[in-house]
Amino acid sequence: MGFAFALAQTSVLAGGAAGQNRNADRPQYDRPQYDSSDPRQHGYEHGYRDGADRGRQDRERGARRQSANDYQSGARDYDPSFGDRRQFMNGYQQGFQDGYDDGYNFYERPGRYGQIYGRRDGGSRQSDNRDYRGGRAWDNTFDNGYRDGIAAGQQDQRQNTRSDYRRSRGYQNGDTNFQDGFERGYQDGYGRSRFQSDGGGYFPSRGNSGPADTRDGAGPSTRTIVVPGNQQWTPTGIRVNFGDKLQMQITGQISLRQNDPKDVAIPQGSLLQRFAPNAPMPKVLAGALIGRIDSGQPFGVGNLSSILAPASGMLYFGINDDVVSDNSGQFNVVISW
């Protein structure tokens, strides 16, 4: 069975100047502020983070500035526990557009991340993982880690300290979702350009597990990643760089419905040849193995033996399904660079 692979669902045109910013004359700190339990603020924070990643990645690969209309993908992030759906989506749309403009037109400015995600009480929740916004547990855990990572990255940046997110006690004590959020937040708080230029803070493990960076040449250049069928996105712990050639061996299968033994997916997707309209890639078969860099556009992986990284950042693998909670099984990816 073949698998149509595209680095993005929409084509982009090279060119465009980074200086074309329709918000260039706006004050740096004019972003809206809401109570932290407000669903619109929750949506804004999700949207800003996603939009900044998309804008930065478009700028990195020389793509023309997009209309930032992909904010509708935020509907997949919504959960009823977040509160009113319309408020969440309104906040997500505004946050996505603001984040995209900032990511595309400017080098990263840690101060803006601090203003949006900073702890109002000035403290750090570190790895307590409390349900402080009433949302999904994994979402709260990631957000807690992201906020703490922002604060730690900004502190190291102000002190002119070489980036190293792993020395933080909060990071060390957190679970996988907290650490994922902390690392992402640390990069944004420290400033992505400087984070990359000073070594990236990875100081990678020389074993076959733990954080890895395709740039440094330290340790084995192979990892085995388990991608659970019941988890939308799985962080690999591997930081890739734009244009890297990633070689893969992919095995396994997942069940897409508990009560239907025939509804099974292999890495290329559903054996029933069905689609999931609300999946991250609705035009790709349900259950297929997909990928993304940070919160960038998802791309197809399937059973490909190699891909070129479409952007720089943390590599994720995912399941192309609209409801993953009733899935079972896993894909196994042996990836090397």
Image (spheres, rainbow, N blue to C red):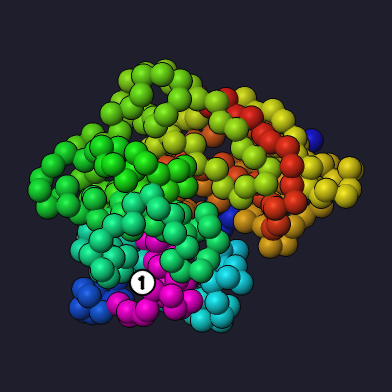
Q: Is residue 111 left or right of residue 266?
A: left
Residues drawn in magenta = 31-53
* Magenta span: chief secondary structure: helix
Name the spot of residue 262 as percent of width and height, x first. Answer: 89, 43
**Which residue appears at 39% of the width and 32% of the height?**
211
**Which residue appears at 33% of the width and 20% of the height?**
218
Using a 10 Å C-alpha cutoff, classify the residue at mark 1 as few (fewer than 14 neighbours), some (14 to 19) or many (20 or more).
Answer: many
Q: Is residue 211 magenta?
A: no
Q: Is residue 152 visible?
A: yes
Vertically, is 215 above or below 18?
A: above
Name the spot of residue 314 as percent of width and height, x first. Answer: 42, 42
Q: Is residue 178 left or right of residue 125?
A: right
Q: Is residue 183 left or right of residue 302?
A: left
Q: Quadrant of residue 194?
A: top left
Name the spot of residue 334 as percent of width and height, x first. Answer: 57, 25
Q: Is residue 204 left or right of residue 249?
A: left
Q: Which residue is mark 1?
A: 98
In the image, 222 versus 323, the foreground residue is 323
Q: Is residue 4 visible?
A: no
**Which residue appears at 34% of the width and 43% of the height?**
171
| Quadrant location of the N terminus in the rendered image | top right
Q: Quadrant of residue 275?
A: bottom right
